[in-house]
Image (cartoon, grey):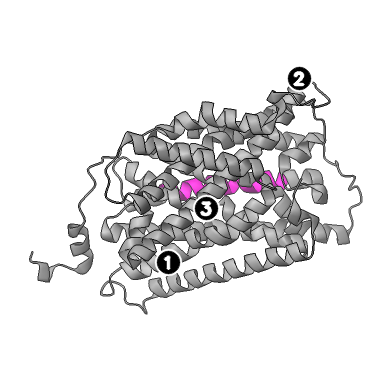
Amino acid sequence: PTASSTSPGVLACLLVAPSPFEGKTSFGMSIFNLGNAIMGSGILGLAYAMSNTGILLFLFLLTAVAALSAYSIHLLLKASGVVGIRAYEQLGYRAFGTPGKMAAGIAITLQNIGAMSSYLFIVKSEFPLVIQAFLRADNNHGEWYLNGNYLVVLVTVSVILPLALMKQLGYLGYTSGFSLSCMVFFLSAISRARIEHPCTTGWHEENKENMLCFMFTFFAPQTAYTIPILAFAFVCHPEVLPIYTELRNPSQKKMQQVSNISILIMYTMYFLAALFGYLTFKENVEAELLHTYSRIDPYDTLILCVRLAVLTAVTLTVPIVLFPVRRAIQQMIFPNKTFHWLRHIAIAVVLLIFINMLVIFAPNILGIFGIIGATSAPCLIFIFPAVFYIRIVPKDEEPMRSTPKLVAACFAGLGVLFMIMSLSFIIIDWTMGSSNAAGGH
């Protein structure tokens, strides 16, 4: 057909050179990688979030965020399919030129650096305690192997860096599967702890008043952190297109299935982990769940194994999250450069050095969850997929007043509202001098 008889959507696809890369990652491995990208240290803050909302409101919010995440991935994949581009930053460039590319790249960089920082902060705070418990050492006398700063650097160099230097994301499917297995063990163990310690906090009376608070907690200053923590727990959007690129026999429908299954698995794990943690400790649950469990018996073998499993899981998640950041940096700084091992390695090393320095000086993990979740997450989940979809899908296929684009516009507006509300709540919480705003430990 001639150019005049070709629709703009098809013409756009013809004008974009197809990637010479042929995806070789299986459907199952792609689910492992995306599930691992979704899962992270956010799971440790969900019981705390439930203690601030009650079970019913938490379940409603978790369901809403999961559904919205799946819908935003649909928008992202639809926009990607129209122009044949499988890079988040390039979608931004196609929609808004250089400002769009820079905005997407910066949001991905901030979001994933925040995620990696929170993962390594878990290593810094938990690893020394686990070693100390295994050694049955009641006091820390300053030994180097009980210093979190040394340990986080050691883990970074020995485990994270070699995995981060892999050329393709698909190679990490096996480590992602092992990481998810560690979290399944974590879930099994806390369900057993719930059975063995049903009344840890001394909540013995069961009357209508405390049952109402148990199911639905009314607004408190700490509730400001609930939605950002939930949003942070489901952000996987920077990893979607790289995983799509490496998927064997890729199609929009197949990648949407990968996304839906991954979100469903993590939705189930998130809810059960939050529920068992909350039912065990009620209002005394801490912002980081593992610290709360260590109060039962710091030398309990099962709890120690759980803490070690979570450390392993979050450590193996860091390389998955690093890939999109490196890709974003290359798109922003070296857009026309082909792959080069020296640049590939150098970006990873610089990123890990920066993140390690950030972790060593990070004040608390709750602040990381709240601030990053309230800024970058709304952009990546709500705003960017919606506005990219509106700008990229041709008007002759879907007019501006068509239902899909109106829904997408409302979706973007919801993201802006969500960002403003979340930041406002967190600022109010800080100005009130809440102890939980200063630290969750």
Disc 3 marks a residue whose amino acid type is Gln
Q: Which mark is residue 135?
A: 2
Residue 367: x %, y % from top left = 67, 53
Instruction: Identify the residue position indicated by label 1 in the image.
Output: 386
CA separation, marks 2 and 1?
Answer: 52 Å
Q: Residue at the spot x=80%, y=61% of the render? A: 433
Position of the N terminus, as image quadrant, is bottom left
Q: Are marks 3 and 1 in contact (CB under 8 Å)?
A: no
Residue 269 shows in the view? no
Is 299 rendered above or below residue 18? above
Q: Residue at x 48, y 59 (%)?
A: 380
**Sequence-first tag of 2 and 1:** 2
Pick the front one: 28 or 395: 395
Residue drawn 80% across the image and 30% down it: 298
Which secondary structure lies at badge 2?
loop
268 displayed left or right of 397: right
Residue 131 vs 436, above or below: the answer is above
User: Is 181 a magenta residue?
Assistant: no
Q: Which dot, 2 or 1, sits closer to the camera?
A: 2
Inspect this view and state whether residue 376 appears: yes
Name which of mark 3 and mark 1 comes first in the sequence: 3
Q: Secondary structure at mark 1?
A: helix
Mark 2 Cα shell of 10 Å, populated few (<14), some (14-19), many (≥20): few
Give the percent coordinates (x, y) of residue 176.
Answer: 49, 35
Taking the magenta stretch, the answer to whether it contains residue 271 is: yes
Read off the magenta span: 258-276
Q: Which mark is residue 111?
A: 3
- Seen at 38% across and 64% down, the residue is 100
